[in-house]
Image (cartoon, rainbow, N blue to C red):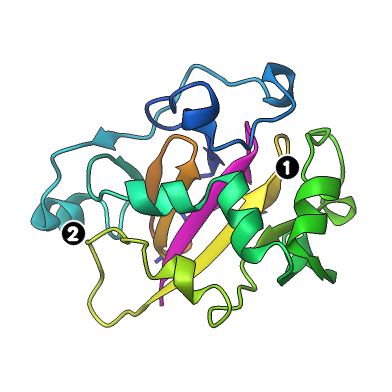
Amino acid sequence: MAPGPLLLLALCALAAPARPGPAGDGGWRRAGPAAAAAEEERCTVERRADLTYAEFVQHYAFLRPVILQGLTDNSKFRALCSRERLLASFGESVVRLSTANTYSYRKVDLPFQEYVEQLLHPQDPTSLGNDTLYFFGDNNFTEWASLFRHYSPPPFGLLGTTPAYSFGIAGAGSGVPFHWHGPGYSEVIYGRKVLYFPDRWWHATFNLDTSVFISTFLG
């Protein structure tokens, strides 16, 4: 399949806003409203709340992205991903950070609590990707199994594929420049969307707020 049109995935801008205040942001927006990047009003990605699997395969799976609403209930997983609870459970765990450029050239290992308290702050959107470190992918699934077992992935799979998770947390203004990979879903746990992206669909990511997210890659 040829690469599709370019798509910017503003990770916190593609569905209904999260509830404001401590209960809605899980304690992640600690720097106040100024920590959020500006949001564009226009979004051309179609939203579906009543999609059947047959419709998904026919209209989206191999053709174009779609924002999916109401597919799963991850309220328990969301509660476990609050700032307070993640620090209590995994603060001393070592996480691997990657640079935010397309190929993540540099990796840095440090305790999760150190990352949250020292590096998880609003970024200048003009900063270079190789100057930005953030936590996405490179997960220790054994160490974090007590968290991941509570996650309910989107139910629509593709024949012959196996889902693989990529969990992460990133500051406002961070992201990854245009790239492509296999098909999958991106769900913001503290944010506003579940988005499906087809195979080799060019896209970039930009976190409008401090975001806790998980992607399900179908490979």
Image position, residue 158 (x, y; %): 25, 71
- Label of residue 196 in the image: none
Q: Residue at x 44, y 28 (%)?
A: 18
Kindly report the distance in space between the C-alpha atoms of the residues bearing marks 2 and 1.
Answer: 32 Å
Residue for badge 2: 57
Q: Which residues are magenta?
A: 202-219
State which quadrant residue 109 falls in.
Answer: bottom right
In the figure, 190 relative to 169: above or below?
above
Q: Residue at x 59, y 21 (%)?
A: 39
Q: Residue at x 49, y 36 (%)?
A: 191
Residue 11 relative to residue 77: left or right = right
State which quadrant residue 150 falls in.
Answer: bottom left
Residue for badge 1: 174
Which of pointers 2 and 1 indicates the residue nearer the eye? 1
Secondary structure of residue under mark 2: helix
Amino acid type at mark 1: Ser
Image quadrant in which the N terminus is located? bottom left
Q: Residue at x 48, y 63 (%)?
A: 200
In the figure, 170 relative to 111: above or below?
above
Secondary structure of residue under mark 1: loop
Q: Please, which residue is most extreme toward the front here?
A: 88
In the figure, 110 relative to 185: above or below?
below
Amino acid type at mark 2: Val
Specify whether residue 217 is painted magenta: yes
